[in-house]
Image (cartoon, rainbow, N blue to C red):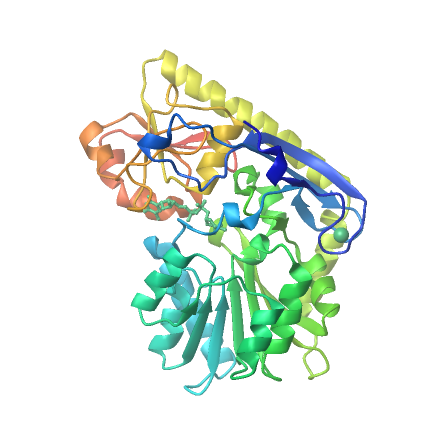
């Protein structure tokens, strides 16, 4: 059932308003990828929403071709970063680096837009800083408050920013893996400009479009992610709101990310050599249709190769299960139309997801212990961004001859 009434087709670029949108990949209609089902819901109609991406040939922002209303996706959110030591280490390092670089002290307020369960802010709080989280998922805001992280369970907006700014102006605003979810980018920037202390800094982290294309990470395209950023469109966006991107860092998390540092223009901060170099590289590699169309060609090849491999393993009587009931995994399963015939179930560490079923293909989700009890032959790793961490955790599975299959960046069995 395609839920036409809820979906808006994008005809104008969400950043620059341009009409030159070049669609380059269509993954078909599928349910919201974080919409895990309970057994009692399996027979109910499951709304499917179009999933495809286009690139604006004016500002080079890649973005969804159709938008699903936020309230269908974020009111009871099941993603928490704190289940992965990879992300805990990453956020711990981020907090330490920013406290040192910007000489943050106990009087300074750090505000996190999309603060989730308070994982990142807890690192700042432990260093004695003032913290405030903003996240619309009330289930996660409750978790954050239980950790002592004051959290407003509302969507960040310029109106909310004006309200907060009446009492406090943060020295640091962080936004990690949230910009992609924001519908009104201009309102968010206006809010940050209102809120930020005069010498304050905005630090934004996001999966990097250049890595997404280069590493064929099609499964990170889903309804929650409205935009897929490179540096150039963000430089343009912030400059329209009186801010300058003065530094950028390359990060390995989530299949390749960027971290940008921005502040008010006219306060002596100028773009670093790293910013200039990356903008030049993007002009050569991302500002033309070829990069996007070639990516789409590789994705279709990889999807066919994955199904071929799963069918041949099935024909040989080998059993395959999934690992990491992630949004990415659900995009992959639905776009390749892989159900329990080829992948019997998924194991996952997050209690919220266990004993539920994946949206669309209805694979049952079990705790990770199932692998030891059931001893399948292969594990298709949906959470490839945690490959090292998960393979270390499942050394016994591999010692028994179990093997991991990857579908990203290319289809292969890990030896
Ligand atoms: O932008 C987003 C990215 C950052 O993360 C969010 N909108 C949604 C989310 O995407 P995802 O669902 O693909 O997230 P993860 O964190 O890549 O999913 C990993 C899954 O794997 C989680 O469900 C937890 C699970 N896991 C596990 O079962 N055992 C993870 C680890 C590290 C493990 O050891
Ligand atoms: Zn544009």
Residue 382 in the image, given as x and y percentages of width and height:
42, 37
- Residue occupying the point 39% across, 65% down: 118
Q: Nearer the viewer, residue 36 or 198?
A: 36
Residue 289 point in image, percent of width and height: 76, 40
- Asked if residue 146 lies left or right of residue 153, the reply is left
Task: Work out whether residue 30 or residue 247 is closer to the camera in this orientation and state it.
Answer: 30
Query: Is 136 placed left or right of 259 in the picture?
Result: left
Q: Which percent across, then down, holds residue 94?
A: 45, 68
Please report the residue visible at 62 percent of the width from the left and 39 percent of the height from the top: 7
Looking at the image, residue 13 sits to the left or right of residue 134; the answer is right
- The residue sitting at the bottom extreme is 107
Residue that protrudes farthest toward the left in the picture: 373
Question: Residue at image x 52%, y 23%?
Answer: 305
Quadrant location of the C terminus in the rendered image: top left
Residue 394 image offset from top left, x and y in percent: 27, 40
In this rendered view, identify the residue nearer to me: 28 or 376. Answer: 28
From the image, which quarter does the N terminus lie in?
top right
Judging depth in this view, the residue of 204 and 401 nearest the camera is: 204
Residue visible at 62% across and 69% down in the picture: 158
């Amino acid at each position: 059932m395609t839920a036409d009434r809820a979906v808006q087709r994008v005809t104008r670029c969400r950043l620059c308003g341009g009409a030159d949108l070049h669609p380059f990949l269509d993954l078909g209609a599928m349910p919201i990828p974080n919409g895990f089902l309970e057994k009692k819901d399996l027979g109910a109609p499951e709304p499917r929403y179009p999933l495809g991406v286009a690139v604006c040939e004016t500002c080079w922002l890649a973005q969804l071709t159709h938008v699903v209303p936020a309230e269908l996706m974020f009111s009871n959110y099941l993603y928490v970063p704190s289940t992965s030591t990879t992300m805990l280490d990453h956020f711990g390092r981020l907090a330490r680096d920013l406290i040192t670089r910007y000489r943050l002290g106990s009087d300074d307020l750090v505000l996190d837009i999309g603060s989730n369960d308070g994982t990142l802010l807890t690192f700042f709080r432990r260093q004695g800083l003032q913290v405030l989280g903003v996240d619309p998922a009330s289930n996660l805001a409750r978790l954050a408050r239980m950790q002592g992280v004051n959290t407003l369970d509302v969507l960040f907006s310029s109106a909310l920013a004006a309200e907060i700014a009446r009492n406090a102006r943060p020295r640091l605003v962080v936004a990690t893996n949230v910009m992609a979810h924001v519908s009104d980018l201009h309102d968010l920037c206006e809010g940050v400009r209102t809120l930020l202390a005069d010498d304050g800094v905005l630090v934004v982290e996001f999966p990097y479009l250049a890595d997404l294309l280069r590493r064929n990470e099609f499964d990170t395209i889903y309804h929650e992610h409205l935009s897929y950023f490179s540096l150039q469109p963000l430089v343009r966006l912030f400059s329209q709101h009186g801010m300058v991107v003065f530094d950028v860092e390359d990060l390995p998390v989530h299949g390749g990310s960027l971290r940008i540092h921005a502040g008010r223009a006219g306060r002596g901060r100028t773009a670093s050599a790293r910013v200039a170099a990356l903008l030049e590289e993007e002009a050569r590699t991302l500002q033309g249709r070829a990069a996007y169309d070639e990516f789409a060609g590789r994705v279709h090849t990889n999807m066919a190769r994955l199904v071929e491999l799963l069918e041949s393993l099935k024909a040989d009587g080998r059993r395959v299960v999934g690992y990491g009931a992630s949004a990415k995994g659900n995009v992959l399963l639905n776009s390749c139309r892989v159900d329990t015939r080829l992948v019997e179930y998924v194991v996952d560490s997050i209690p919220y997801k266990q004993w539920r079923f994946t949206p669309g293909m209805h694979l049952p989700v079990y705790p990770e212990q199932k692998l030891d009890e059931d001893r399948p032959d292969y594990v298709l790793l949906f959470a490839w961004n945690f490959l090292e961490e998960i393979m270390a955790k499942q050394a016994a599975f591999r010692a028994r001859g179990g093997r991991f299959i990857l579908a990203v960046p290319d289809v292969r069995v890990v030896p």
